[in-house]
Image (cartoon, rainbow, N blue to C red):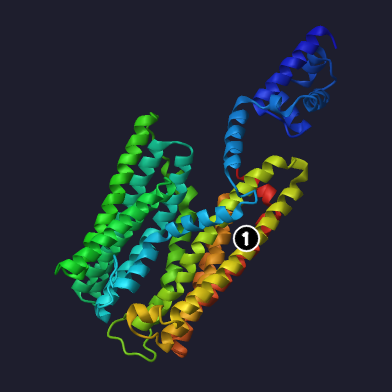
């Protein structure tokens, strides 16, 4: 090689580095050289090699003699500095896991704080933000149906908020985060309104309930659904403390109005829910306005079809998941076996008490799920940085080992929570102290079966969280649809042939199927994690 060819090669080394940083193999170098418009016929004259591949091997070998830091382009240096800073601050890869577990477990409980607070409030005070222990069965039917529809109708939009707004937030696109938040909340609210206009028209043709009943149900659904929609962005924007604050203020106001005024419980609930919603809305508005003033950006709107394509599976998964959770209640309350009901769906107190106690398993495991998913993300970031591309199997094995550790932690936590729930329903300081009555045999049976079902459901949801981190969202949707069909089929058969409360068995078996399907999928996911990690970027 002459002097000019050596200079040309040196420039080419720099150009390849600036384009790709550290190339993973010689083929990447060859492809990069070709992308510069360099041909085989040019290589011998300009660089002194027979062809591009020979030149690429020389350049790739030269990189091995240069320190890794010098091979990083500017974008890589910035990205890795942020990554290592984040990893340095975490304790998931050190011996201080207990401290992280406590912190993440608490954070996970905050995720479910709105519903958990209502369970605690109704146990202690007999009144909460959307329930009242002294409602008669007809009133309870209207209220509970409203709450159920509010959860189900908003669930898909809540899931999309978590996906879409989080994406824009992490990319510091605050304009799109603000626009998406506003648009999704509006669409979700109009969906609830549209559904109940349709329901009202159907009820006029086929009078299943009175007009007042439908209106009360609609208002509860609207207020609950709107509350869930406006709380959801607080998760994505990492402002969860506002969620706790708004729900606590709303609940405190509802309790105060209930104790010190003669306002009807319906209006007390609506005032409390609306107060919590407005606190959340006000904070989100001013918070995003503050961020927009700090970061000026070009205003643009997301492409509608692209947004639908990206979020459609998430939307359906959220809807089916919440429909699955409440399905057994609707199936049980619509059964006429061993009970006389005046309406097509009629509230049954003992069944609801059993399921309310059972769902504590799900709430308390929420903290374990929070820790597991944070630990998984940190381990994945860490191990992919320290593992060579040729040692991908080592990366997969380490992550698979971490998954089994999480399963053991999940099992140990579930055992501890089960013991707590057993004491809660059997000891004098538990349920009996809160309600001045013993659990009925039916409630106890439903509680036990429902607890096992929620345990399986929680594990299935944890598996889905692993899959979601790398964009695997199609299979979870299929699994929850299958579980839903199993739930409704077994629930209807048993509630009509054995006894109405055995609809809970449909939920249990459906949850077990969901857990099996997602565990099988997640195990395969971890066996090929290197591929999914690469394909997601």
Front-most of 446 and 210?
Answer: 446
Residue lying at the far left in this picture: please name it: 262
What residue appears at the point 68 percent right and 20 percent down from the top-left corner? 15
- Residue 531 position, x and y percent, is 68, 48
- Decide which of 282, 97 is in the foreground and name it: 97
Residue 35 visible somewhere in the drawing:
no
The residue at the far bottom in this view is 338
Q: Which residue is mark 1?
A: 406
From this view, report whether residue 512 is shown above or below residue 494: above
Label 1 environment density (alpha carbons within 10 Å; few <14, some 14–19, many ≥20): many
SS of the residue under disc 1: helix
Q: Quadrant of the N terminus?
A: top right
Tell me if residue 62 comes above or below residue 364 in the rendering.
Answer: above
Query: Is residue 483 left or right of 500 when viewed as pictured?
Result: right
Q: Position of residue 414 (x, y in %)?
A: 56, 70
Residue 314 seen in the current view: yes
Location of residue 111 in the rendering, given as x and y in whole percent from the top left corner = 44, 57
Residue visible at 25% across and 79% down? 138
Which residue is at a point 38% across and 92% down the rendered structure image? 338
The quadrant of the picture occupied by the C terminus is top right
Residue depicted at x 35% and y 39%: 288
Q: Quadrant of residue 219?
A: bottom left
In the current view of this chain or complex, which residue is farthest to the top? 3
* Residue 315 placement, left or right of 5: left
- As drawn, 154 above or below 206: above
Q: Say whether residue 149 is left or right of residue 394.
A: left
Count every numbered label the image shows and give the total. Answer: 1
Q: In x, y percent, where is residue 251?
A: 28, 62
């Amino acid at each position: 090689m002459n002097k000019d060819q050596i200079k040309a090669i040196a420039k080419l080394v720099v150009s390849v580095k600036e384009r790709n940083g550290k190339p993973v193999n010689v083929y990447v170098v060859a492809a990069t050289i070709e992308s510069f418009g360099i041909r085989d016929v040019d290589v011998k004259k300009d660089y002194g090699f027979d062809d591009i591949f020979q030149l690429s091997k020389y350049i790739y070998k030269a990189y091995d003699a240069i320190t890794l830091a010098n091979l990083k382009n500017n974008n890589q240096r910035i990205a890795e500095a942020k990554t290592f800073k984040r990893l340095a601050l975490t304790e998931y890869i050190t011996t201080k896991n207990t401290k992280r577990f406590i912190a993440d477990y608490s954070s996970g409980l905050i995720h479910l704080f709105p519903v958990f607070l209502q369970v605690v409030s109704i146990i202690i005070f007999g009144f909460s933000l959307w329930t009242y222990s002294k409602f008669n069965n007809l009133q309870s039917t209207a209220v509970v149906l409203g709450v159920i529809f509010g959860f189900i109708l908003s669930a898909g939009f809540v899931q999309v908020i978590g996906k879409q707004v989080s994406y824009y937030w992490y990319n510091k696109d605050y304009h799109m985060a603000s626009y998406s938040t506003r648009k999704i909340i509006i669409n979700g609210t109009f969906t609830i309104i549209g559904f109940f206009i349709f329901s009202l028209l159907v009820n006029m043709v086929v009078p299943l309930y009175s007009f007042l009943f439908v209106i009360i149900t609609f208002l509860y659904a609207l207020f609950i659904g709107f509350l869930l929609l406006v709380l959801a962005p607080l998760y994505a924007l990492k402002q969860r403390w506002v969620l706790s604050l708004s729900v606590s203020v709303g609940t405190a106001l509802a309790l105060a109005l209930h104790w010190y005024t003669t306002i009807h419980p319906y209006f007390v609930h609506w005032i409390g829910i609306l107060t919590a919603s407005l606190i959340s809305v006000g904070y989100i508005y001013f918070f995003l306005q503050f961020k927009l003033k700090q970061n000026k950006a070009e205003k643009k709107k997301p492409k509608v079809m692209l947004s639908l394509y990206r979020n459609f599976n998430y939307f359906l998964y959220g809807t089916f998941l919440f429909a699955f959770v409440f399905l057994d209640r609707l199936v049980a309350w619509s059964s006429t076996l061993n009970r006389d009901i005046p309406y097509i769906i009629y509230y049954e107190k003992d069944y609801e008490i059993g399921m309310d106690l059972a769902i504590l398993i799900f709430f308390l495991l929420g903290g374990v799920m929070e820790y597991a998913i944070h630990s998984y993300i940190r381990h994945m970031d860490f191990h992919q940085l320290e593992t060579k591309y040729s040692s991908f199997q080592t990366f997969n094995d380490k992550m698979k080992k971490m998954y089994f550790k999480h399963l053991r932690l999940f099992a140990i936590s579930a055992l501890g929570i089960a013991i707590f729930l057993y004491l809660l329903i059997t000891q004098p300081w538990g349920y009996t102290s809160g309600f001045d009555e013993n659990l009925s045999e039916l409630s106890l049976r439903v509680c036990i079966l429902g607890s096992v079902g929620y345990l399986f459901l929680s594990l299935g949801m944890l598996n889905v969280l692993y899959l979601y981190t790398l964009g695997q969202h199609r299979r979870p949707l299929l699994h929850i649809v299958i579980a839903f069909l199993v739930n409704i089929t077994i629930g209807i058969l048993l509630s009509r042939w054995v006894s109405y409360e055995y609809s809970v068995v449909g939920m249990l078996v459906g949850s077990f199927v969901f857990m099996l399907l997602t565990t099988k999928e997640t195990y395969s996911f971890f066996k090929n994690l290197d591929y999914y990690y690469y394909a997601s970027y």
